């Protein structure tokens, strides 16, 4: 036994085993935040980004593979989703901006160049929803949700590098949205269009009927995209369109009785939804603050801060004793989706840290740290790298892919970088 302990001590000294520092129950907020920053930064730079760099670069057809499963098997012939590629662009651009590691810049540039060559529709404008493994157009529909991430990623690449071609690409999609996707009668943005911008009613993100004409999810990610574009292009009209999105949330998407987000609405903003999505709730709570902070409107910011805490408290209905956040609740049946999915955990860590920063109330810091502890212990693959997409209520790892059309190093990568930038010491 003594020999085993001696070997472990030697390995720790040599830096071959990374063991998290144990914090006492009496550790103060600053010490806890510092430890949180240390752990998430290590996970980002030693696990998450290296996993994607090693496994997902398509050296045959260019860009990145479209899928890797739970057993780390790559599917080289899988279609390449626009969401996946745009989120990869954002993640590595942001990582380069923060860490100044040129290896991240190389992958960000690879993503940007591939998108410019293969995803952008040079005839009709906007970007395709997906291309095939060889980079040829596959799903040519113009989905507002998908394209918002091209704005988000291109704006971040410009922010990190000053590349004007990327900024122009982001601006061009913004102009297409304002021309084609904006509901000029009732405000907000519609969901899906044909390649040449004829509106369709395809159900791509959970809509169930043709009455579900506007979705919380699309407006949430459009807001974050416009926030990032405004950050690098502080144009007066851009400010007005971003403020409009914030006000849409305040006036139409946040339920005034419950403070949950209304997931689906008809054209005139009447609710068609019976779902509480806890992950989207907590994500919106901090994204609204980010957008409004940039706008510099003190009156609007005061209103948003107050609402943000109410949303964070509403999302807490999904918190579990183990620190995790369950996915959603069906209000019609009362059924709770109890899987611990990777992305709501990521958003809870940021969202409750943001709530702590707004209020100074340590219960929110507890929620952030506890959710990270659950994530660290259950969702990260410490053997083969990367993150699992989810675990069951009993802790069994799910069979979902580690990377694919919807699963990207974005929610988790962004969480890590948000913590790194928020915790300064």
Image (cartoon, rainbow, N blue to C red):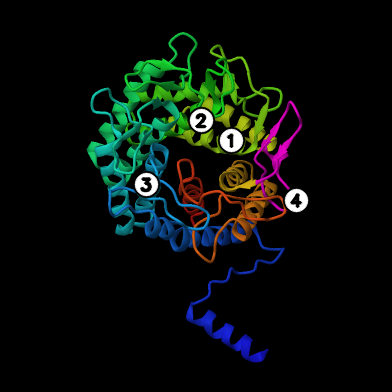
Q: To which residue does mark 2 refer?
A: 220
Contact, mark 1 vs mark 2 (Cβ under 8 Å):
yes
Which numbered disc flags the more N-terminal residue, 3 or 1?
A: 3
Q: CA distance from mark 4 to mark 3?
A: 42 Å
Which numbered disc flags the more N-terminal residue, 1 or 4?
A: 1
Q: CA distance from mark 3 to mark 1?
A: 32 Å
Question: Around disc 2, counting alpha carbons within 10 Å, would you say few (fewer than 14), some (14 to 19), or many (20 or more)?
Answer: many
Dot in front, 3 or 1 = 3
Which numbered disc flags the more N-terminal residue, 1 or 2?
A: 2
Residue at 55 percent across and 16 percent down: it is 210
Dot in front, 4 or 3 = 3
Q: To which residue does mark 4 refer?
A: 321
Residue 280's tag is 1
Q: CA distance from mark 1 to mark 4?
A: 20 Å
Residue 176's tag is none
Which stretch did the figure color magenta? 315-339
Residue at 68 percent across and 55 percent down: it is 395
Please indicate whether residue 226 sits to the left or right of residue 248 in the image: left
Q: Judge whether residue 358 is colored magenta.
A: no
Q: To which residue does mark 3 refer?
A: 77
* Element class at badge 2: helix
Place of residue 352 in the rendered image (x, y in percent of width and height, measured from the top left):
62, 45
Which numbered disc flags the more N-terminal residue, 4 or 3?
A: 3
Quadrant assignment for the N terminus: bottom right
Dominant secondary-structure state across the stretch colored magenta = loop
337 to 171, vertically: above or below: below
Place of residue 57 in the rendered image (x, y in percent of width and height, measured from the top left):
34, 54
Which numbered disc flags the more N-terminal residue, 2 or 3?
A: 3
For this orientation, the residue located farthest to the bottom is: 3
Dot in front, 2 or 3 = 3
Which numbered disc flags the more N-terminal residue, 2 or 4?
A: 2
134 to 380, vertically: above or below: above
């Amino acid at each position: 036994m003594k020999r085993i302990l001696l070997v472990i001590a030697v390995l720790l000294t040599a830096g071959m085993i990374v063991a998290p520092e144990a914090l006492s129950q009496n550790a103060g907020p600053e010490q806890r935040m510092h430890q949180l920053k240390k752990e998430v930064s290590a996970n980002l730079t030693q696990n998450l980004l290296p996993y994607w760099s090693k496994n997902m670069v398509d050296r045959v057809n260019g860009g990145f593979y479209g899928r890797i499963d739970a057993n780390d098997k790559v599917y080289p012939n899988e279609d390449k989703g626009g969401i996946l590629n745009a989120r990869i662009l954002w993640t590595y651009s942001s990582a380069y901006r923060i860490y100044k590691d040129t290896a991240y810049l190389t992958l960000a540039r690879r993503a940007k160049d591939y998108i410019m060559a293969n995803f952008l529709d040079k005839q009709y404008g906007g970007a395709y929803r997906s291309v095939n493994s060889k980079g040829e157009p596959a799903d040519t529909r113009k989905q507002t949700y998908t394209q918002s991430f091209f704005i988000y990623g291109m704006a971040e690449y410009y922010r990190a590098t000053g590349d004007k071609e990327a900024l122009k690409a982001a601006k061009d999609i913004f102009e297409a949205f304002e021309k084609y996707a904006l509901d000029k009668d009732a405000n907000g943005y519609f969901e899906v269009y044909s390649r040449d911008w004829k509106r369709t009613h395809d159900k791509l993100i959970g809509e169930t009927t043709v009455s579900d004409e506007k979705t919380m999810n699309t407006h949430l990610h459009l807001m974050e995209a416009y926030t990032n574009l405004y950050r690098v292009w502080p144009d007066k009209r851009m400010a007005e369109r971003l403020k409009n999105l914030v006000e849409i949330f305040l006036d139409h998407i946040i339920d005034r009785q419950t403070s949950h987000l209304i997931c689906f609405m008809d054209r005139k903003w009447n609710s068609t939804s019976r779902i509480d999505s806890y992950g989207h709730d907590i994500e919106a709570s901090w994204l609204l603050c980010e957008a409004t902070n940039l706008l510099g409107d003190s009156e609007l910011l005061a209103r948003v801060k107050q609402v943000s805490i109410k949303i964070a408290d509403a999302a807490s209905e999904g918190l579990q004793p183990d620190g995790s956040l369950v996915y959603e609740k069906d209000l019609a049946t009362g059924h709770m989706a109890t899987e611990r999915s990777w992305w709501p955990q990521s958003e809870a860590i940021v969202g409750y840290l943001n709530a702590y920063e707004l209020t100074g109330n340590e219960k929110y810091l507890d929620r952030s740290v506890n959710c990270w502890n659950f994530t660290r212990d259950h969702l990260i693959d410490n053997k083969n790298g990367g993150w699992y997409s989810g675990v069951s209520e009993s802790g069994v790892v799910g069979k979902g892919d580690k990377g694919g059309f919807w699963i990207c190093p974005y929610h988790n990568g962004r969480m890590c970088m948000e913590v790194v930038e928020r915790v300064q010491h």
